[in-house]
Amino acid sequence: MILGAAPLTNAARAEEKREIPPLVSAWLHAQTNIQTWSADVKQIRSLKTLLQPLTATGHVWFAAPNKFRWEIGQPPQTIAVRKSDEMLVIYPPLKRAERYSFTAQASGPWKETLALLEAGFPRNEADLNRQFSIATLTFSNDVCQLSLQPKSPSARRMMPQISVAFGTNDFILRATELHFADGSTMRNEFSNPRLNPPIDPALFEPKLGADYTIVEPMKQR
């Protein structure tokens, strides 16, 4: 957050000078080779109110720089589609969809928080540094887990931490985990990844029937 021409604090200067670890730099460099990506996904949601986590399976598609489609459930119970200026969250059984705008006119914690969902696909060090501070870096066998804290205070209040796991030998995304302010988490574990497969552009342009109800939660806040 920029506050006029106020001088940098010592903490801010240290943050600017902090170097990204070499392994993370190598992972970021590998992202430049990704134009499209798809994988099966196992989604695990842990809530404080439930003794056992909720588990569902589905599929995810990604197209650089910022398009993705998630389908959770078989048949899909939830579909999330992000393109350049908006995201749609579609609930086919309910004939309902939520639209979130990413345009310049939209603002606030929801916009900033939703933008964090691309954490698994930063294009370069500037992308990573713009949104996140690196909290921890841990290793287990051939997997590196990177814990990130959002730099935006409003986004951090809603989602204090995001974890990204990738292979140390192939730099392929293995998992992401979102930590929410209420103590709940959403972990996505990826399998059967495909690098640069052909993807039909229509996947990112869902057609909603006239019987769908479309709401815009950002405008209601």
Image (spheres, grey):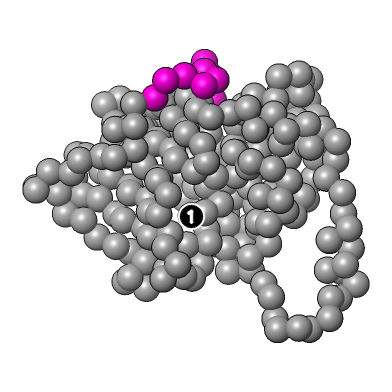
Q: In the rendering, at what x and y percent does residue 106 appear?
A: 42, 68
Picture layout, residue 192 above or below residue 152: above
Specify the farthest residue to the left.
211
Picture coordinates of residue 198, whole percent (x, y): 42, 20
Vertical order, 186 against 165 (above or below)? below
The N terminus appears in which quarter of the rendering? bottom right
Check disc 1 and report its element: helix, strand or loop: helix
Please give the range of residues in magenta.
Answer: 189-199
Q: Which residue is mark 1?
A: 114
Q: Nearer the viewer, residue 23 or 202?
A: 202
Residue at point 38% right, 53% down?
Answer: 86
Residue 163 x/y as whole percent: 66, 42
* Between 29 and 88, the one nearer to me in the picture: 29
Q: Can residue 46 be seen by looking at this rendering?
A: no
Residue at image point 33% right, 64% down: 217
- Residue 218 can be seen, yes or no: yes
Q: Residue at x 69, y 75 (%)?
A: 2
What amino acid does circle 1 point to?
Leu
What is the count of numbered marks?
A: 1
